[in-house]
Image: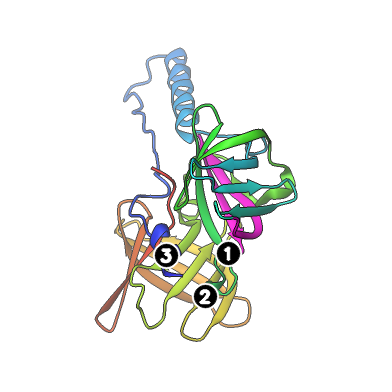
Amino acid sequence: MKQFRKFLLVLLPLFFLLAACQSQPATKTSSQSTTSSKKATTSTKKKVRNKVKLTAVPLIGTWKTSDGIQFTFNPDGKWVYETSNGAKTDGTFQVAGGYGRDVLLKLHGLDQGIGGIGNYLGVRFDTTHKKLNIVGFGHFTLAGEASHITTDLLMTKAFSGTPNTLREELVGTWMNTDENATDAITTNYNPDGTYERYSSANKEVEEGRFAVVNNHSDTKKLEIKLSPSNSKAYTLNFTRDNGISQLTSSSKGVATTYVKNQMPE
């Protein structure tokens, strides 16, 4: 469990919220210039959005490291991880989103120490799409041929471009940075607005829906409203870094910092 938590707690942002701002002329000189300005703004936004067609991602196949470790993603949504000495681990996966050459997966079976809620895992292709960098596992090269993922492997409301809302930025697995915390909380925020929250203290999983409340008067603050399926809604208050890769809460003078799983560098 500790080993897995360590490679998920890399301190680089998962998502970089990119914004393109184009100043508008103070005086409208002509309808032609106005039209040109709008086209330029639209063009810039499309470029920044950095969309990707998820069903064109060639993930399905077997990927190997130089040390003989292999990660296989099957078309039926099952994955298999095999070490060089033949030890195997397996489970299921879904695609939560992607942009550029980055893809965010949600795997079940990777770590059973968090109530089976699954873990988000970042993957980055190289420009040839023949190599992968998988967070915490290293660099892999395609063995044989790869095929594209299918629509049934996509999570509900999987994003297909650079995250441009606070809710999309929040998607992923969050864990306490203190591995020895009395209550190590692991939370998954999903693209469709649902969440799973595991408490190591009571060994229970809470599920429900979440909503992000942005305090525009203070960009360093963030409120997340959780609405459990079997109890009353409540709100978590955090301070955050410039993006959303680190959240810190404070209770009775004790600060707790949570870090989100990351995309490869």
Residue 135: image x %, image y %? 46, 50
Q: Which residue is denoted by mark 3 in the rendering?
A: 3
Kindly check if marks 2 and 3 are in contact, taking CB atoms under 8 A apart as contact: no
Residues under numbered marks 1 and 2 in contact, where contact means CB atoms less than 8 Å apart: no
Graded by Cα atoms within 10 Å as few (under 14), some (14 to 19) or many (20 or more), the crowding at tag 3 reads few
* Residue that appears at 70% across and 52% down: 77
Q: Residue at x 56, y 82 (%)?
A: 204
Magenta region, residue range: 86-110
Residue 198 got which mark?
2
> Quick one: label 2 or label 3, which is nearer the N terminus?
3
> Which tag is nearer the camera, tag 2 or tag 3?
3
Q: Name the N-terminal-most of marks 3 and 1.
A: 3
Which one is nearer the viewer's eye here, 210 or 82? 82
Q: In this view, does 174 lie to the left or right of 253?
A: right
Describe residue 92's horizontal placement relative to residue 172 as left or right: right
Residue at the spot x=49%, y=45% of the render? 67
Q: What residue type is labelled 3?
A: Gln
Real-space CA distance between mark 2 and mark 3, rounded to the nearest whole angstrom: 18 Å
Q: Is residue 154 left or right of residue 35?
A: right
Residue 99 position in % (x across, y down): 52, 38
> Viewer-nearest of labels 3 and 1?
3
Residue most toward the front? 85
Q: Which amino acid does label 1 sit on?
A: Gly
Residue with the mark numbered 1: 118
Residue 162 is marked as none
For label 2, the SS is strand
The spot of residue 75 in percent (x, y) is 73, 45
Q: Confirm whether the magenta stretch covers residue 95.
A: yes
